[in-house]
Image (cartoon, rainbow, N blue to C red):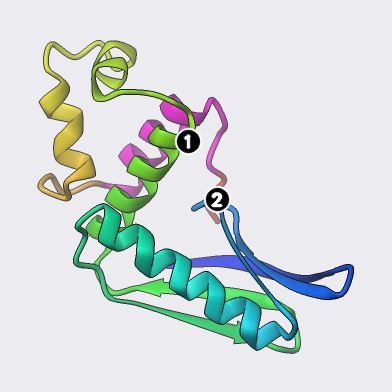
């Protein structure tokens, strides 16, 4: 699964951003900004105890950052948990929003224990953020 972000100049620094993860890295060069973004993702993976391999690369001509994860379910679980926490929602809140009897049914998505379709991912993302996920 690929996620694209951007690299832009802000004052004297470059900022590499992945909006879907709500994560940034800043540096004096584009490469340094991307490296700091990569480090931020690694730290978040550790916090979530998530074993997910990824690549992060810069497309210099377009100033895009490309995030590639080898395991789609693990990436989906990472995004869902990150967005839930950013929106100050608990697992119980998610169960209530989804009209589920158990918070564990949603938690299985965040733990990567339940395979997730792209459509279901988009539905869950929208439930968390109140924003549609445009898929192209």
Whether 6 is drawn above or below 61: the answer is above
Mark 1 Cα shell of 10 Å, populated few (<14), some (14-19), many (≥20): few
Which of the two residues, 38 or 71, is positioned nearer the viewer here?
38
Whether 35 is drawn above or below 48: the answer is below
Q: Which residue corresponds to the image point at 27% horizontal and 62% vertical from the top-left? A: 46
Q: Quadrant of the C terminus?
A: bottom right
Left or right of 28? Residue 127 is left
Left or right of 101? Residue 24 is right
Q: Quadrant of residue 123?
A: top left
Left or right of 56? Residue 116 is left
Q: Is residue 128 magenta?
A: yes
Q: Quadrant of residue 27?
A: bottom right
Q: Is residue 1 visible?
A: no
Q: Which residue corresponds to the image point at 44% horizontal and 26% vertical from the top-left? A: 88
**Contact (CB < 8 A) between labels 2 and 1?**
yes
Residue 13 percent coordinates (x, y): 80, 74
The kind of secondary structure element at disc 1 is helix
Separation of residues labelled 2 and 1 (CA atoms): 9 Å
Among numbered discs 2 and 1, the one appearing first in the sequence: 2
Q: Is residue 107 magenta?
A: no
Mark 2 Cα shell of 10 Å, populated few (<14), some (14-19), many (≥20): few
Res 10 label: none
Left or right of 52? Residue 10 is right
Residue at the farthest right position: 11
- The residue that mark 2 highlights is 22
- The residue that mark 1 highlights is 86
Q: Quadrant of the N terminus?
A: bottom left
Whether 110 is drawn above or below 29: the answer is above
Magenta span dominant secondary structure: helix
Highlighted magenta segment, given as a residue range: 117-133
Residue 131 percent coordinates (x, y): 57, 31
Q: Which residue corresponds to the image point at 71% horizontal and 89% vertical from the top-left? A: 60
């Amino acid at each position: 699964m690929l996620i694209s972000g951007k690299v832009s100049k802000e004052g004297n620094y470059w900022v590499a951003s992945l909006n879907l993860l709500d994560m940034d890295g800043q540096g004096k060069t584009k490469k340094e900004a991307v490296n700091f973004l990569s480090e931020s993702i690694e730290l978040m993976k550790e916090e979530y105890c998530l074993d997910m391999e990824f690549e992060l690369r810069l497309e210099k001509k377009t100033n895009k950052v490309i995030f590639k994860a080898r395991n789609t379910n693990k990436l989906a679980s990472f995004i869902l948990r990150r967005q839930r926490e950013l929106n100050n929602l608990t697992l119980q809140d998610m169960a209530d929003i989804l009209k589920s009897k158990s918070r564990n049914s949603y938690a299985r998505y965040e733990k990567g224990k339940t395979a997730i379709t792209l459509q279901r991912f988009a539905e869950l993302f929208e439930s968390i953020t109140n924003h549609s996920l445009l898929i192209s």
